[in-house]
Amino acid sequence: MIGIGVIGCGSISIFRHVPEYYSRSDCKLVGYYDPLTNRAQSLADKYGGKVFNSLEELLADKDIDAVSVCTSNKYHASITIDALKAGKHVLCEKPMATSEQEAQDMINTAHSTGKFLMIGHNQRLAPAHLRAKEILKSGELGNVLTFRTTFGHGGPEYWSQDKGRHTWFFKYDDAFIGAMGDLGVHKADLIRWLIDDEIIEAKAYVTTLHKTNEKDEPIEVDDNAICLLKSKTGIFGTLTASWTYYGAEDNSTVLYCTNGIMKIYDNPEFPIEVKKINGEKVYYKVGRIQTNQDQSSSGVIDMFIEGINSGKEPEINGEEGLAALRIVLACLESAKTGKSVFL
């Protein structure tokens, strides 16, 4: 039985981490810490476990084998490092850190302590993305030439436990980055995984177009990003992240290949559509993707726990998280300088 501690008790813990741990028979939720004690208490009341009065108290508990770090972005690195040093395996939410150096420090600490570090990039675990990867590996669509991948919704103020425009997602000191870190980092991880290639160049516009805070001032982080990415083998395409898609959420990816086109999560009825160069059309009715309104299992908790049980490091480790973060940071630099950035 793996003892679990949850650090940060906002929406990502409430809707994903905690219920997914609870659903497993090989996990026990030992306890929770959040500066807002009532949030931790609500989870303890519903799922069992205790409320810790401090982070130090939670990390000192010998019944806790692993933790989820579900705080605002600025605390990811420091808490993860402290948890690893305390002998805990760590599942950290994305983006894993606010700088490449922080991320590398997290990775180095995991290596030196012998504990697992996993980053919560759930998109590559979505059913259609897993099936799409199989189709690409089969070779039936030939080689990927170009792509577009998009993640946009109406904004985190509708999802965060801090409902409204005062949410930490809008504050630079807590978040350091906006839509590009919240949504874009998901697609950065997904696209490099799908095409099985590294991004080596980025040109981007990352800016604030519409969101305002509780003072009716523009938020301190970006609400939109449009990025042009190029891979090592010459594949290129666009990555779009937006908090101003006020209609339906868009979480789609399209791959343009030498033998046809594959659309993923573009059609609500068929999560994968394949249209081949010979005119053949194939529709795959595989599982849906998570949305803020539809909290199906992410697969992240399962991978984390199964890795601990088997003693085999989870696929989405610190190095994978850093690779996605580097793309995000390159896009930020490009937006600031107006120039292409080489990774």
Image (cartoon, grey):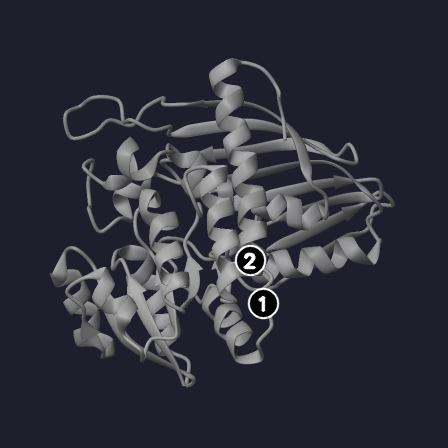
Q: How many marks?
A: 2
- Which residue does the image show at 52% across and 33% down from the upper left? 240
Q: CA distance from mark 1 to mark 2?
A: 7 Å
- Which residue does the image show at 21% across and 29% down from the upper left? 213
Q: Which residue is mark 1?
A: 313
Position above or below: 63 against 153: below
Return the mark for residue 100.
Answer: none
List the single residue furthest toward the top. 338
Spot occupied by residue 301 in the image (x, y as percentages of width and height) = 45, 68
Kindly state the secondary structure of the residue where label 1 is placed.
loop
Q: Quadrant of the N terminus?
A: bottom left
Front residue of this view, candidates 277 and 296: 296
- Which residue does the image show at 39% across and 59% down from the upper left? 294
> What amino acid is found at the position of numbered circle 1 in the picture?
Glu
How would you rate the neighbour count of disc 1 (Cα within 10 Å): few for under 14, some for 14-19, many for 20 or more? some
List the single residue furthest toward the right. 278
Kindly state the secondary structure of the residue where label 2 is placed.
loop
How would you rate the neighbour count of disc 2 (Cα within 10 Å): few for under 14, some for 14-19, many for 20 or more? many
Front residue of this view, candidates 255 and 28: 28
Q: Quadrant of the C terminus?
A: top right
Q: Is residue 98 left or right of residue 29?
A: right
Position above or below: 105 against 149: below
Q: Is residue 173 left or right of residue 20?
A: left
Spot occupied by residue 226 in the image (x, y as percentages of width and height) = 52, 27
Return the mark for residue 317.
Answer: 2
Q: Say whether marks 1 and 2 touch (CB < 8 Å).
A: yes
